[in-house]
Image: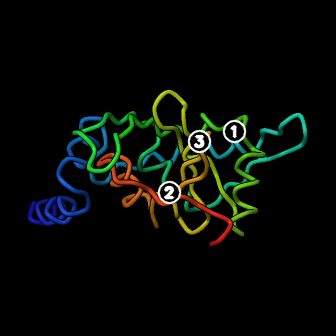
Amino acid sequence: MAASASYDRSSATRFPVTVDAALRAAGWGPGRWDIKQAEFWADTLRDHTSPAGHRHTVFPAAVEAWAEFGGLTVGTPAPGRQIAPARLTLDPLSGLHLARTFADLGRALGTSVAPLGQEGEGGAQLAVDREGRVYSIDHTGDWYLGGGIDEALTTLLTGLQPARLTTAG
């Protein structure tokens, strides 16, 4: 029982209070881990080939993000700090038919990129790279959301302005 209380205390500081509350309301909790579903998504993405021959890449950072957060639809917990926060659907299959888009972003970044989910009603696609960094791709450009899934969720759900990716570095 003491180990459980210790685990809960450490998880309480993982996310800001409003982000933690939004994630919990969506069904997330410390220890959530659905590797069977994550492996299904990995197999589905690996098996898909676009009509032009583009394929998705799958790697541990993506599978880990899917196992912990996949399948959640997270509402916005409060007004945004700098921009309006978006509703998130963490489902990598939302990017199934965008293999070329993810490959192009990965090539520009010098890494591989896999789908993570979407913002709003598909207005932006979320992506994760081999190192666990998270990005958003929308009609206005590509955005850096954070060095890991925790930072990205905090950026998105608190309405922090993400950094725009540019060719200048």
**Residue at figure coordinates x 72%, y 69% from the top left:** 110
Task: Say which amino acid is labelled 1.
Answer: Thr
Disc 3 to disc 2: CB gap under 8 Å: no
Which numbered disc flags the more N-terminal residue, 2 or 1? Answer: 1
User: The N terminus is located in which quarter?
Assistant: bottom left
- Mark 2 burial class by Cα count in 10 Å: few <14, some 14-19, many 20+: some
Name the foreground residue: 64 vs 19. 19
Q: CA distance from mark 2 to mark 1?
A: 16 Å
Q: Is residue 158 shown left or right of residue 107?
A: left
- To which residue does mark 2 refer? 64
Q: CA distance from mark 3 to mark 2?
A: 24 Å
Q: Is residue 118 shown left or right of residue 160?
A: right
Q: Secondary structure at mark 1?
A: helix
**Residue at figure coordinates x 64%, y 52% from the top left:** 114
Spot occupied by residue 140 in the image (x, y as percentages of width and height)? 59, 43
Vertical side of 140 occupied by 154: above or below: below
- To which residue does mark 1 refer? 44
Spot occupied by residue 119 in the image (x, y as percentages of width and height)? 47, 37
Which numbered disc flags the more N-terminal residue, 3 or 1? Answer: 1
Task: Say which amino acid is labelled 3.
Answer: Asp
**Residue at figure coordinates x 31%, y 50% from the top left:** 82
Task: Say which amino acid is labelled 2.
Answer: Glu
**What is the quadrant of residue 74 in the picture?**
top left
Q: Residue furthest bottom?
A: 169
**Residue at figure coordinates x 62%, y 72% from the top left:** 169
Spot occupied by residue 45 in the image (x, y as percentages of width and height)? 70, 42
- To which residue does mark 3 refer? 138
Name the foreground residue: 126 vs 161. 161
Disc 3 to disc 1: CB gap under 8 Å: no
Spot occupied by residue 118 in the image (x, y as percentages of width and height)? 52, 38
Vertical side of 145 occupied by 119: above or below: above
